[in-house]
Image (cartoon, grey):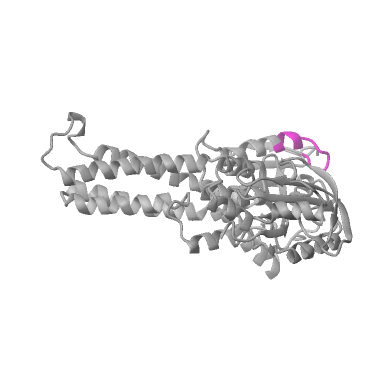
Amino acid sequence: MPGKSTIAALATPAGEGAVALLRISGPLSESITEEVFARKSPPPPRKAILGTYTDVAGHPLDQALYTYYAQGASYTGESTLEIACHGNPLIAQKILEDLQERGCRLAEPGEFTRSAFLNQRMDLSQAEAVMELIQAKSEKAIEVAQRHLRGGLGDRIRKLTQRLIRLCAQLEAYIDFPEEDLPDEDEEGPRADLADLIAEVHRLIETNRFHESLTQGFKLAILGAPNAGKSSLLNALLDRDRAIVSKTPGTTRDFITEQITYGALNLEVIDTAGLRDGGSEIEKLGMERTIDIAKQADFNLLVIDSADTLPALPQDLLEGLSPANTVVAENKADLESSKDLQDYLPALPHCRISVKAGDGMKALKELLHTNLNALVELPGEETVIVNSRHKKLLDEGHGLLRDAQLKLESGSTEELAANDLRAALDAISSITGTAGTEDILDSIFLNFCIGK
């Protein structure tokens, strides 16, 4: 329980570095600060001070910066000490061992943030946002995590629960006082408000479609016939040679995948096997896999050799291509035999390029950037659900609200509808931790870093 013990952990990654940060939180923090840095009075809070860390045997371990935070004014809500020592793992380990001798215990994963939640320094959605922010792989994901950390999701959920509480009270008023005169605007009871609330919860659930693209990134497949320039285009997007480039057809027989940060997005770029008639058995297996990858990809770059005959691409592949998920790159535009292929798949956006000469690459990247951003255009200040736990609870709450609505419309007793509303309230309020259990907390904070 917070306040009953003092925890300590390394808050920076293990290994050599310029600085290692150790974090201590709990009732012993103040006395430890005075003892290890030989202070005769409590340290001034929130002020970085240079001192020498001395162990219990009186041996100096390192010169370090230390910052003390008073109870109620720290990340965890408890008195906290942060020590920035030199980034030698041996020094950090010796300090941790000394802290244990002074009565600290090693923190469990996520225990500092868990203490912050239990001490009401943040709600559960904000606590989860800490890990979302640490693990974010793109600017968009960081934007959403910071929005949650500032309390955006928590505020949204609290407004929903307040509306739901009023609905419960309104419905129970009809149950307890059926013969009382109610205001004219309440003649239909809570039905209109309930319908609005159901629609609001549904809109919040719908934002979950951004979850995978924000947390895992987009899958971008590079498709086309052999020798169209797919591998060269991959290397150009990566700004390094990743794939083998050869004039021999079928050089890429399996897919090659690379993760890159592209503008504000995280991309998994996949260079696929070339698509053509014939080929060896191994090539055919590679082409089958290419079609599967194209179906699973969020976006496709279809590379065509504009100096060659038009490729005979599989019909089931072409049927899955649309202006929203594909850009056609007409490669080798620098060659005299190059032709304008705008009439080929005319519904799709085209861009004439020469990967070898670098022509048109800027325009292709800008077109790609525009189309990818359109896939994850965040709805203004709308709070995005980036956590499957949130969606599960909202789905549960939404189902219970619909059950209550159906009961009211069918003329069932208001008591049954009121039970559904109260159950929905429990489910939705669990997102911010109002109705959280120890098991839920364990499952969430188990995935946190030690020292966070």
Q: Residue furthest bottom?
A: 281
Side of 95 relative to 108 (left or right)? right
| Between 19 and 416, the one nearer to me in the picture | 19
Q: Which residues are magenta?
A: 354-365
Classify 44 as above or below 102.
above
Looking at this view, name the residue that lies furthest to the top.
184
Name which quarter of the figure residue 112 lies in: bottom right
Q: Quadrant of the N terminus?
A: bottom right
Residue 323 in view here = no
Front in this rendered view, residue 311 or 75: 75
User: Residue, x 72% and y 59% (percent of image)?
Assistant: 9
Q: Quadrant of residue 345?
A: top right
Residue 55 rendering spot, x and y as whole percentages: 83, 61
Tell which of 16 and 3 is nearer to you.
3
Instruction: Look at the image and say whether residue 362 sits in the magenta stretch.
Output: yes
Number of marks: 0
Residue 96: x and y in percent read 77, 62
Look at the image and say whether residue 356 sits in the magenta stretch.
Answer: yes
Against 266, residue 289 (above or below) is below
